[in-house]
């Protein structure tokens, strides 16, 4: 399941679009605070926790594969660092619509239809109590699954209930939506479909099933 | 004239009957719980907690926990159990009962221990006990603040009275609380702070530390002292 990972220097990735690019679905102030404060803090704390340790030369996949043995500081901040940088990549401006090709086939096969997949994903996102994430993953056997994780855990971690390679994610921590949506998490989830970058999700899917 | 006086008195007693304290909430059969009134206006805790947060926190989040709790217990044996009993046997309760019972009680206590023109420090027996337990109010304040800051994700920080009458600071995840049978550290809550992001995000965003610092200005120590007196009886 663990792919070979390339070890590069740790860096905080740039956002590929402006803070207002996802308006009106995600507001500019949320994007700016989410990226420069929340995500940045996870990166800084993660790096501080691994600097000068054996983990500095390990890739995230390997860290996640043994996270149950590591400190809660590494778990929470490695998770927060990865989850957010993954999230920024699978959403974008001028996106939304439907998946096509092999991914569309796999979604129809697994969930019955794209709408049924959306319903299941929305349920996972709505029902994740407290802080966490909803995911579409590719499991070890190549099948698709919808799952959710608490706090900054993710399905790559050995502690996850349902493990697999993420190809789509939605942050349901309140910081992800509270400025614009307050308690109305379902409205945020509905808006999310307008910004999903299906090209990216598709290429993630194709890589995962290689 | 007499009829309107009678109506007025009945109306007032209706309001009084609906003003359940958390101690009453804990001992009332769940099915008979009422939604507590806020003892102050939404603006009353400004600038420490902003009025929009107060309005949404009380009328949306807290209200939803109450409504969903009532729905979850209706027509079940939980209806006749007091919330205290529900908490004691929480491991066997389905998630909707657990999360909403917790959310209902936790928020009722949160709004109960806050008030405008408050803050300062506790007096009386509680002050002595805090002095003995933590080495002074400032030490207690730092320990409680650290707990509130250290709770990762959604949850609460608490000051509780344990069964041996000692004080302890604990935190819980999500809508769990120290009255629950499966709590790591059990005790009777007398002070708490909500650190779910909805409690502070509109005004403070990621700056939880600023929210926790402001919280000390809105604690109604009289209520906390009274809860302490009842807890050690």
Image (tube, coloured by chain):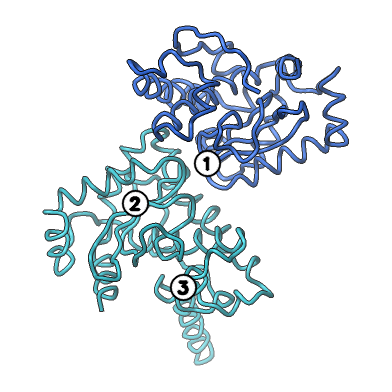
Disc 1 is placed on an element classified as loop
Task: Looking at the image, tell me whether mark 3 or mark 2 is earlier in sequence order.
Answer: 2
Relative to residue B164, is residue B40 depicted above or below? above
Residue at the image point whose x is 49% and y is 55% from the top: B175
Q: In which quarter of the image is the N terminus of chain A?
A: top right
Q: In which quarter of the image is the C terminus of chain A?
A: top right
Disc 3 is placed on an element classified as helix
Asked if both marks, 1 and 3, belong to the same chain, the answer given is no
Marks 1 and 2 sit apart, C-alpha to C-alpha, by 26 Å
Tag 1, which chain? A
Residue at the image point whose x is 83% and y is 34% from the top: A110
Residue at the image point whose x is 19% and y is 51% from the top: B140
Which label sits on residue B84?
A: 3
Q: The cyan chain is which one?
A: B
Tell me if B40 is positioned left or right of B91 in this view.
left
Quadrant in the rendering for residue B134: bottom left
Q: Do the residues labelled 1 and 3 touch (CB within 8 Å)?
A: no
Q: Where is residue B124 in the image (x, y as percent from the top left)?
A: 14, 68
Tag 3, which chain? B
Relative to residue B207, is residue B21 depicted above or below? below
Disc 2 is placed on an element classified as loop
Colour chain A is painted in: blue
Residue for badge 1: A131
Mark in the foreground, 1 or 2: 1
Q: Position of residue B219 (x, y in %)?
A: 28, 56
Residue for badge 2: B45
- Disc 1 crowd, CA 10 A, few/some/many (<14, 14-19, 20+): many
């Amino acid at each position: 399941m663990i792919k070979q990972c390339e070890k590069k220097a740790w860096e905080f990735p740039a956002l590929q679009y402006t803070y207002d690019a996802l308006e009106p679905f995600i507001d500019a102030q949320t994007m700016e605070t989410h990226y420069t404060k929340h995500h940045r803090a996870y990166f800084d704390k993660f790096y501080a926790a691994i600097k000068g340790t054996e983990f500095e030369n390990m890739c995230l996949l390997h860290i996640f594969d043994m996270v149950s043995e590591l400190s809660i500081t590494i778990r929470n901040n490695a998770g927060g660092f990865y989850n957010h940088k993954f999230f920024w990549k699978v959403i974008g401006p001028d996106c939304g619509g439907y998946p096509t090709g092999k991914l569309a086939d796999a979604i129809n096969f697994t969930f019955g239809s794209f709408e049924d997949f959306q319903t299941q994903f929305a349920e996972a996102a709505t029902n994740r109590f407290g802080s966490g994430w909803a995911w579409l993953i590719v499991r070890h056997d190549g099948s698709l699954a919808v799952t959710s994780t608490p706090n900054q855990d993710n399905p790559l971690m050995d502690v996850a209930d349902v493990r697999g390679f993420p190809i789509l994610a939605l942050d349901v921590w309140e910081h992800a939506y509270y400025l614009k949506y307050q308690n109305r998490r379902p409205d945020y989830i509905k808006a999310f479909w307008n910004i999903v970058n299906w090209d990216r999700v598709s290429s993630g899917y194709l890589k995962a099933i290689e | 004239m007499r009829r309107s006086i009678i109506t007025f008195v009945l109306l007032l007693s209706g309001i009084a009957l609906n003003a359940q304290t958390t101690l009453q909430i804990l001992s009332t059969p769940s099915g008979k719980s009422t939604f507590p009134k806020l003892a102050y206006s939404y603006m009353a805790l400004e600038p420490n907690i902003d009025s929009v947060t107060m309005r949404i926190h009380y009328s949306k989040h807290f209200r939803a926990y109450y409504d969903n709790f009532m729905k979850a217990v209706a027509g079940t044996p939980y209806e006749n159990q007091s919330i205290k009993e529900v908490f004691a046997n929480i491991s066997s309760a389905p998630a909707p009962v657990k999360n909403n019972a917790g959310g209902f009680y936790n928020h009722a206590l949160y709004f109960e221990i806050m008030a405008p023109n408050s803050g300062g420090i506790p007096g009386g027996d509680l002050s002595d006990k805090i002095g003995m337990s933590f080495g002074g109010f400032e030490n207690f304040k730092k320990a409680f603040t650290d707990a509130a800051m250290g709770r990762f994700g959604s949850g609460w920080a608490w000051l509780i009275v344990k069964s041996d009458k000692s004080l302890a600071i604990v935190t819980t995840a999500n809508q769990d609380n120290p009255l629950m049978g499966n709590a790591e550290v059990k005790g009777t809550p007398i002070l708490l702070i909500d650190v779910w992001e909805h409690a502070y995000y509109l005004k403070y965003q990621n700056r939880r530390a600023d929210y926790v610092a402001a919280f000390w200005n809105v604690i109604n120590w009289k209520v906390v002292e009274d809860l302490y007196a009842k807890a050690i009886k």
